[in-house]
Image: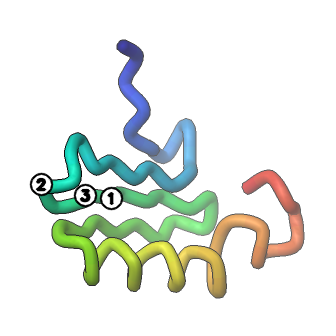
Amino acid sequence: MPNLAPSNNAPGLHVSKPSPSEPATASAVCHCGASASAKGDDQVSALVAGWNANHGSAHGGGTE
């Protein structure tokens, strides 16, 4: 399986939840230089909400 983690060269958001009994994990790197990671369903949910509100397509590019 390829490495799906975002990086400065490949910005994005990656969320993983291997099974229902394990906590979710997430990492994000934005083209603007911001980065974050989270572990646990609630923290991952907050990271995704923040990404959607402040990064990614919120920058106006639609694909960043």
Q: Residues within 10 Å of mark 1 (few under 14, many from 20)?
A: many
SS category of the residue bearing label 2: loop
- Residues at circles 3 and 1 in contact by the CB criterion of under 8 Å: yes
Q: Mark 3 belongs to which amino acid?
A: Thr
> For the residue labelled by badge 3, is the local secondary structure a helix, a strand or a loop?
strand
Count residues near mark 3 (Cα–Cα under 10 Å), then give few for <14, some for 14-19, many for 20+. some
Nearer to us in this view, 17 or 27: 17
Amino acid found under the numbered disc labelled 2: Glu
Q: How far is mark 3 from mark 2, CA to CA?
A: 9 Å
Vertical relation: 43 (above or below) 18: below
| Quarter assignment of residue 37 | bottom left
For image coordinates 39% across by 53% down, the residue present is 15
What quarter of the picture does the N terminus occupy?
top left
Residue beneath label 1, please? 26
18 sits to left or right of 16: left
x then y, percent, for residue 19: 21, 45
The image position of residue 22, as x and y in percent, is 12, 54
Residue 51, compared with residue 23, is above or below; it is below
Residue 22, disc: 2
Count neighbours of disc 2 (C-alpha within 10 A) and say few if under 14, some if 14 to 19, many if 20 or more: few
Residue under numbered circle 3: 25
Mark nearer the viewer, 3 or 2: 2
- What's the residue at 87%, 72% (across, down)? 60
Looking at this view, is 18 or 56 the one in front?
18
Q: Amino acid at mark 1?
A: Ala
Q: Residue at x 27, y 82 (%)?
A: 42
41 relative to 3 in the view: left or right: left
Observer-side mark, 1 or 2, equals 2
Q: Which color scheme is applied?
A: rainbow
Looking at the figure, which quarter contains the C terminus?
bottom right
Residue 48 percent across, percent down from the top left: 48, 73
Are the residues flagged by discs 1 and 2 in contact, CB closer than 8 Å?
no
